[in-house]
Amino acid sequence: METTSSPKKQLLHLVIGGEMRNLDSVEFRDLTKLDYVGAYPNYAQARDAWKHAAQSSVDNAHMRYFVIHAHRLIDPNGPIPDDEDH
């Protein structure tokens, strides 16, 4: 018996980064110089992109990257998958 599984629902995630004003806050030094890494259909792919970007900027202590759960902004009452429960 062959079963077909439906594709997972797309959950939009954005990865961005930039230099912080100081190490004690989350305030970008210059919003015009944000590094837009990309948009991803799930947390796992976004986390991989975040990890790569963060590791590539390890020499700059003021540079930080973030995963933005854009699907939560679009649909704040939507479900939170188990792999995002953080």
Image (cartoon, rainbow, N blue to C red):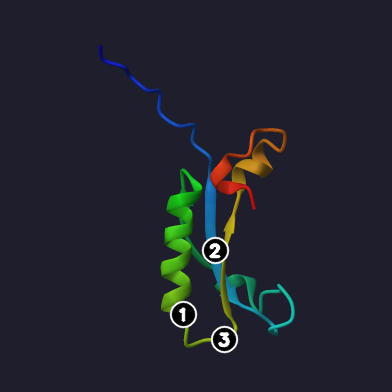
Residue 47 in the image: x percent, y percent? 48, 58
Left or right, 82 with reference to 55: right
Residue that carries the numbered disc 2 in the rendered image:
16
Task: Kindly report the distance in space between the C-alpha atoms of the residues bearing marks 1 and 2.
Answer: 13 Å
C-beta proximity under 8 Å, tags 1 and 2: no
Q: Residue at x 60, y 49 (%)?
A: 69
Q: Which residue is painted at 46% across and 48% down in the image?
A: 40
Q: Is residue 39 above or below residue 51?
A: above
Q: Do residues under tags 1 and 3 come within 8 Å of each other at their CB atoms?
A: no
Mark in the foreground, 1 or 2: 1
Query: Toward the viewer: 18 or 86?
Result: 86
Instruction: State if disc 2 and disc 3 touch (CB < 8 Å).
Output: no
* Element type where label 1 sits in the image: loop
Return the x and y of residue 35 as percentages of the image width and height. Answer: 51, 69
* N-term mark: 3 or 2: 2
Q: Which residue is mark 1?
A: 57
- Residue 34 in sight from this viewpoint: no
Quadrant in the picture for the N terminus = top left
Who's the residue at 54% across and 46% down the image? 83
For disc 3, the marked residue is 61
Q: Tag 2, which secondary structure?
A: strand
Helix, strand or loop at mark 3: loop
Amino acid on which the number 1 mark rests in the picture: Ser
Task: Give the CA separation, mark 3 to mark 2.
Answer: 16 Å
Where does residue 5 sit, x and y in percent of width and height?
A: 37, 23
> Callout 2, which amino acid?
Ile
Q: Is residue 74 above or below residue 17?
A: above
Q: Residues within 10 Å of mark 1 (few under 14, many from 20)?
A: some
In the image, what residue type sits under mark 3?
Ala
Number of residues whose C-alpha sits closer than 10 Å to that of mark 2, classed few (under 14), some (14–19) or many (20 or more): some
